[in-house]
Image (tube, helix red, strand yellow):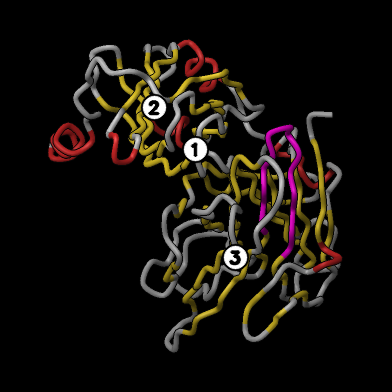
Amino acid sequence: MILYLWVIGFSNPPQEKPVKAMVKVDGYSLLPDGAIVVYVRNIGDAKVNITDTYITDKSGLVLLHKPTLLELDPGEADMVILPAMTIRQEIKPEEGYLIKIYASGGELAVSGKTVIKGSLLQEATRREAPLLGLLAHRSSDPWAKHWVVFDYLSGYYRLYMYVSPGNADLKEKGYAPIVKGKNSYDVCSQKPSSPIVIVVNPTRAQRDWTLEWKCGIGSCYICRFYLQKLQGDIEIDFIVFWEDLYTHPSSSYDDWRDHVIRVTAFFNGTYRLAVLTAKGGYEQEFHLGVDDPLSMPTEPYIYKKPFGAYWANIISGYYHEIPDKVYYVNVRD
């Protein structure tokens, strides 16, 4: 109830006024994983700042408020992106919704609103992103393996392990933490009860960004991960942290950075995979587009870290992408 009142009290759209629209929607598209891209254009003769995007139900109740910082010169066009992760977590597909975009004309204080039919949102919630997978091979025994398969939009994961030759078992399932809107995460004080943690880049790779990762047992320390700006039409950019020892909840796991990978999803369904670090005695595999979670070890992997190998590209104390460990994959081809 408190959350409900907060949404109503602080996230309602501004009062609508019958004023001339300054922003026009030229069109919109639905991306493969369910993100929505709205193409907007300034049709006025003054600079316009797009400030807010709302998703409401038909009665006007705000279900999602996304601050939107776009500055458009007269005639200039740009995009408003509603990430699939946000839509999946906030929207019920059986209901109808409206998308409302608000803009101000600076000193002119001219605002405009555009409404898009909710049927697009219903289709968005039915789309799925490819499943990601990480596998740990613990020894030379071909059956000494465990692996985690997860949906990065919801954080839902399943952890499997071979319990006998050729016989895998589901050991655990749940939801991994998805960290949004933050530049740091403290594993020491917020120890996850899942094998992975997902951290979303708040800049969407539109500018350079650094994440501080505090980890360790007893004596904690900070690791810094530097993500450079990327080019192209990007829907979401995030980092996956994996604790490869994790086979059940325990307080003995230390840093969740046995394998750290940057994942970038582009509009056309291409994924850019960039390893930031991978370490430890286990052989590790990364999979994209897992077809059958239970039999993932028999599916093709994108890359493999050998037993005992240590991968890192540390520059001035910051983890950077490893140049020869960057991969582009389109699982929808």
Q: Looking at the image, is mark 1 or mark 3 nearer the viewer? A: 1
The picture places residue 259, in percent across and down from the top left corner, at 67, 65
The picture places residue 159, in percent across and down from the top left corner, at 60, 49
Give the numbered dot on residue 251. none
Residues at marks 1 and 3, CA–CA distance in whole angstroms: 44 Å
State the residue lying farthest toward the bottom: 219
The picture places residue 46, in percent across and down from the top left corner, at 42, 34
| Three-letter amino acid code of the residue under disc 2 | Ile
Identify the mark nearer the N-term, 1 or 2.
1
| Three-letter amino acid code of the residue under disc 3 | Glu
For numbered disc 2, what is the local secondary structure?
strand
Identify the mark nearer the N-term, 1 or 3.
1
314 vs 284: above or below: below
Which of the two residues, 204 or 39, is positioned nearer the viewer here?
39
Question: CB atoms at circles 1 and 2 under 8 Å apart?
Answer: no
For numbered disc 3, what is the local secondary structure?
loop
The picture places residue 134, in percent across and down from the top left corner, at 70, 54
Who's the residue at 84% across and 43% down the image? 298
Residues at marks 1 and 2, CA–CA distance in whole angstroms: 14 Å
Read off the residue under disc 1: 72
Who's the residue at 51% across and 44% down the image? 155
Read off the residue under disc 3: 243
Count of numbered marks = 3
Disc 2 crowd, CA 10 A, few/some/many (<14, 14-19, 20+): many
Residue 268: in magenta span: yes
Q: Which residues lie in the magenta part?
A: 262-275
Read off the residue under disc 2: 101
Who's the residue at 60% across and 57% down the image? 240
